[in-house]
């Protein structure tokens, strides 16, 4: 964790974020209420600015901490008061985070996308919002999330669509329901792209290929086993083998930057890896019966 935090430049992050937020605030003409309220909107501001909130949120995703609560209570409050002298409690910070969402989206669209190089890769990944057994009782994203199926099985949640260039930089992002076809958001995501776009077999569509080709974008995918073989240029074949680079980007975003967290239950005791006992099974080292030799 210390190595990841040492690479973060809080001053640079805050300067970039603050410039974007000032422009965002000017465009909105300060018509958005500053704080959550019931009834008449309040005109006073929180002592912690939205730019500070955005900086801390961005720093968390590059810190290496597993949960934001541990990051805020163990790192931000004890060590970052010099950089943020008007820090608030953890509970109050959680209340302020939703009010920075639109500004973070503006920051993503303004500063976080790479350049179009003519070689792009597209893929989608699952974003589960709860365990599949609790999907019927889930209320937070009711009406928004849906059932989807990935290579590892069924899930209830959303589908994250990404397009990157050959350097691994983001070019376009879209979030849809889990039951959305991978090809549906593709025309809107690729409106500013040209060159070659490499995807998996889920993007095979003759109509989509022709529509993108008219705009100067060639969609290249692997062929299904039931399809006839077709000649493909050697360069395109080699670039198609580089498509798994986007899988690395998905893993970085989901598991290293903690944009998607999988719920886990704490064990009551730490058992050796060769002897893991269920939490409520009633079995323990003293009641474990080994089979006869």
Image: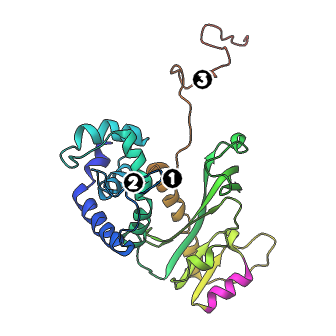
Task: Report the mark closest to the observer, 1 or 2.
Answer: 2
Q: Position of residue 207 (x, y in %)?
A: 73, 84
Farthest-out residue, right = 226
Q: Residue at x 48, y 83 (%)?
A: 118
Sequence order check, earlier mark of 1 and 2: 2
Inspect this view and state whether residue 150 appears. Answer: no
Which quadrant of the view contains residue 203?
bottom right
The CA span between labels 1 and 3 is 27 Å
- For label 1, count other residues whose C-alpha is less than 10 Å away and answer few (under 14), some (14-19) or many (20+): some
The CA span between labels 2 and 3 is 47 Å
In this picture, which residue range is highlighted in magenta? Answer: 205-214
Residue holding disc 1 = 254
Which quadrant of the view contains residue 210?
bottom right
Which residue occupies the foreground of this view, 284 or 126? 126
Q: Residue at x 51, y 82 (%)?
A: 193
Residue holding disc 3 = 276
Q: Residue at x 21, y 43 (%)?
A: 81
The quadrant in which the N terminus is found is: top left
Q: In the rendered view, does 6 fall on the left or right side of 281?
A: left
Task: Report the mark closest to the observer, 2 or 3.
Answer: 2
Q: Is residue 230 magenta?
A: no
What is the secondary structure assignment of the residue under circle 3? loop
Q: Using the image, determine if residue 144 lies above or below residue 238.
A: above
Q: In the rendered view, does 136 fall on the left or right side of 264?
A: right
């Amino acid at each position: 964790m210390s190595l990841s935090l040492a690479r973060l430049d809080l001053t640079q992050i805050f300067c970039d974020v603050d410039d974007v937020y000032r422009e965002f605030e000017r465009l909105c003409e300060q018509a958005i209420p500053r704080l959550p309220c019931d009834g008449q909107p309040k005109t006073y501001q929180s002592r912690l600015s939205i730019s500070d909130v955005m900086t801390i949120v961005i720093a968390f995703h590059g810190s290496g901490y597993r949960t934001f609560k541990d990051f805020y209570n163990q790192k931000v409050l004890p060590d970052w008061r010099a950089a943020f002298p008007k820090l608030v409690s953890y509970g109050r910070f959680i209340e302020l985070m939703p009010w920075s969402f639109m500004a973070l989206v503006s920051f993503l669209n303004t500063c976080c996308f790479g350049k179009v190089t003519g070689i792009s890769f597209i893929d989608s990944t699952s974003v589960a919002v709860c365990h599949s057994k609790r999907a019927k009782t889930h209320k937070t994203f009711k009406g928004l999330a849906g059932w989807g199926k990935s290579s590892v099985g069924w899930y209830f949640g959303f589908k994250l669509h990404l397009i990157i260039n050959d350097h691994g930089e983001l070019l376009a992002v879209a979030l849809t329901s889990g039951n959305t076809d991978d090809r549906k958001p593709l025309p809107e995501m690729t409106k500013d792209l040209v060159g070659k776009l490499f995807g998996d077999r889920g993007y095979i569509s003759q109509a989509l290929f022709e529509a993108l080709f008219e705009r100067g974008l060639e969609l290249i995918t692997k062929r299904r086993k039931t399809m006839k073989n077709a000649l493909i240029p050697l360069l395109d074949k080699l670039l198609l083998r580089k498509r798994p680079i986007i899988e690395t980007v998905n893993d970085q975003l989901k598991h290293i930057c903690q944009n998607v967290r999988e719920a886990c239950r704490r064990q009551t005791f730490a058992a050796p890896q060769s002897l893991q006992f269920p939490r409520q099974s009633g079995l323990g080292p003293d009641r474990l019966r080994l089979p006869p030799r």
